[in-house]
Amino acid sequence: MRIGITGVPGVGKTTLAKHIAEKYKFPLIDVNALVKEKKLWAKIDPSDDAMIVNMAALKRELQTLPQDCIIEGHLVCEFDLALDKLIILRTPIKSLEKRLRERGYGDDKVKANMYSELLDYCTERALRKYKGKETEIYEVLTNKPLHESAADIDTIMGESDKKNSLKAPWVDIVKEL
Ligand code: DAT
C-alpha cells in the first residue's frame, strides 16, 4: 500500500510518518530529504535560505514509487501520485503558530503557513489534484496527543467503515477559531 502524508509545515508529518513507517514496516520517503539528496531545487531563496524546488524534476522522480511506502512532505499535495491513500494532517492555527515559533521561524514564514492552514490549502489542492483518481483522501487532526492522531491513521489503514468519517473534507479550521 502507498500512503502519502501531507500538510503545511509544523502539522506533524515527520513525527507521524516515522511512527507509522516503523509500525507497518514500510519504507519512508521524505520528499524534502529527496530534494536535497538529488539536488532537485532550482535555487535558494535568499530571504530565508529555503530551497525553491524544481517541481518538474521532483514530479519525474516520484513517478516510480515502491509497492509499499509512506511518502511525506508538504509538496505531496501538489502532484497526483500513484497513492492508495493520502492523509492531510491539520492543526488549528494557534497550535500551529506555537510550533512554528518554537522552531525559530520568522514572522513572515509563520504567518504564510498559518494563512495556508486557515484557507485549507493542502486539502483544496489535494482534492483538485486527485479528482477522479482512485486515491482516497483523508484528514487527521494533530492538535491532540500523538497516540490519538496515530490511532486515526490506524483506522484509515484498516478495513472498518469508521474511516469514512475521516474522509476529506471534514476539518473546518475557521469554525474552530
Ligand atoms: P512537520 O514535519 O509537519 O513540519 P514535525 O513532525 O516536524 O512537523 O513537527 C510536529 C511537532 O508537533 C513535533 O514537535 C511533535 C508535535 N506534535 C504534538 N502533537 C502531535 C500530533 N498529534 N501529531 C504529530 N505531531 C505532534
Image (cartoon, rainbow, N blue to C red):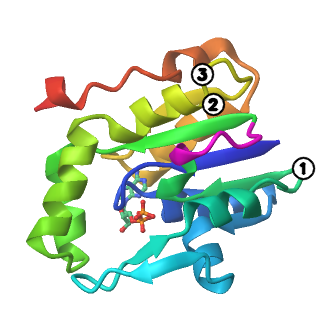
Residue with the mark numbered 3: 131
Horizontal side of 108 relative to 150 (left or right) equals left
Foreground tag (1 vs 3): 3
Q: Specify the segment rendered in magenta.
A: 77-83
Task: Please say if 143 is above or below 16.
Answer: above
Q: Are marks 1 and 3 in contact (CB under 8 Å)?
A: no
Residue with the mark numbered 1: 67
Which quadrant holds the N terminus? Answer: top right
Task: Please say if 166 is above or below 66.
Answer: above
Horizontal side of 37 relative to 121 (left or right) equals right
Q: Label 3's element? A: loop
Residue with the mark numbered 2: 155
How crowded pointer 2 is (Cα within 10 Å; few <14, some 14-19, many 20+) is rated as some
Residue 151, position as x, y percentages in the image: 56, 40
Task: Please say if 163 is above or below 110.
Answer: above
Q: Tag 3: residue type?
A: Lys
The residue drawn where x is 65% and y is 75% is: 34
Please tell me which residue lies in front, 15 or 117.
117
